[in-house]
Image (tube, grey):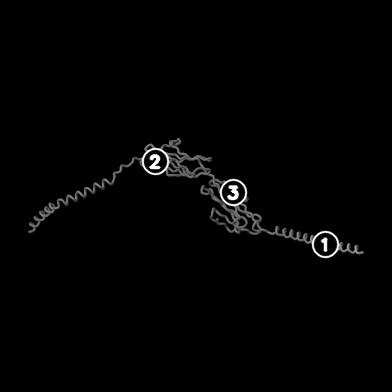
Amino acid sequence: MKERLAKEVSFSELGRSEVNLLKMAWNIRELMKMCKFLLLAILFLPHEVTSSVLTVNDRTENYILDTWLGSQESLKCAVQNHTREEELLWYREEGTVDLKSGNKINSSSVCVSSISEDDNGVTFTCKLQRNQSVSVSVVLNVIFPPILSGDDFQTVEEGSDVKLVCNVRSNPQAQMMWHRNSDILNLEKNHQVHQTSESLQLSITKVKKSDNGTYSCVANSSLQMETKDFHLIVKDRAVTVPKEPIIAACIVVFLTLCFGLIARRKRIMKLCIKNEDPQRETAL
């Protein structure tokens, strides 16, 4: 009898522990379901700041736009995936572009007309007004043949120094060289050439009569070749009379006259007195 009662007690204790484990497992399962629900709710919340995407001419990233002199380019900026009305801003380099009231919301366009070489490398940027870190930029790459400029005529004296500067603007960059009498210039000891992306310079020291003539600046790009003539006129050196000897001679003459007058002052005074006496006698 005692053994039967002991077995019933042990079975009842084992049943209680299993029930507690089942309850704990159930609570953990319900907690996991709740966490999943909250996570899904957070993921599907609207994200106004990050959802809006800008495009310029249907491109979402910065890019380079190839164009030509005298052409016209239209840049259209639009907001994609927006959840509300979005105002847009346009910048040319660091300055804002004036936009009409109907050309600001959700979509905005700017037109660049009569494109010149000065527009080469200029950046246009479209930005979201409420979050200006959201932006797309376009850099104009204006393609044009070489444009040359400089002082056409220079007149110098023999023995002086002179510089012929040929200014160049070209995209793509042009190859530069100096010609003389239709041939490539043969550099002499007194000649020196210096070239940058914007100019070609010919320096001539102690100019000689033989340097007189026409020098041609030649710029050759993949588009075309351009030439500009520079005329150098070398004149005879002017004969200059030194000033110092003349000044010294004048001083010597002046001092000589002064010393002469001082040495003969008594004789001069006597002559002056004799000239005054006859005038007095006549008056009496």
Residue 270, given in percent of the width and then of the height, sits at 11, 53
Mark 2: few, some, or many residues within 10 Å (few <14, many ≥20)?
Answer: some
The image shows residue 276, relative to residue 240, as above or below, that is: below
The image shows residue 139, relative to residue 84, as above or below, that is: above
Residue 272, given in percent of the width and then of the height, sits at 12, 54
- Which residue position is annotated with label 2? 205
Mark 3: few, some, or many residues within 10 Å (few <14, many ≥20)?
Answer: some
Kindly report which numbered mark, 2 or 1, lies closer to the viewer in this rendering: 1
Q: Amino acid at mark 1?
A: Ser
- Which residue position is annotated with label 3? 63
The image shows residue 27, relative to residue 169, as above or below, that is: below
Residue 279, given in percent of the width and then of the height, sits at 10, 56
Say which residue appears at 37% left-offset and 42% top-offset: 160
For the view shown, which residue lies furthest in the front direction? 2
Front residue of this view, candidates 274 and 259? 259
The C terminus lies in quadrant: bottom left
Whether residue 47 can be seen here: yes
Say which residue appears at 21% left-offset and 50% top-offset: 255
- Which residue position is annotated with label 1? 17
Q: Amino acid at mark 2?
A: Thr
Q: Is residue 166 left or right of residue 69?
A: left
Residue 34, given in percent of the width and then of the height, sits at 75, 61
Q: Amino acid at mark 3?
A: Tyr
Give SS at disc 1.
Answer: helix
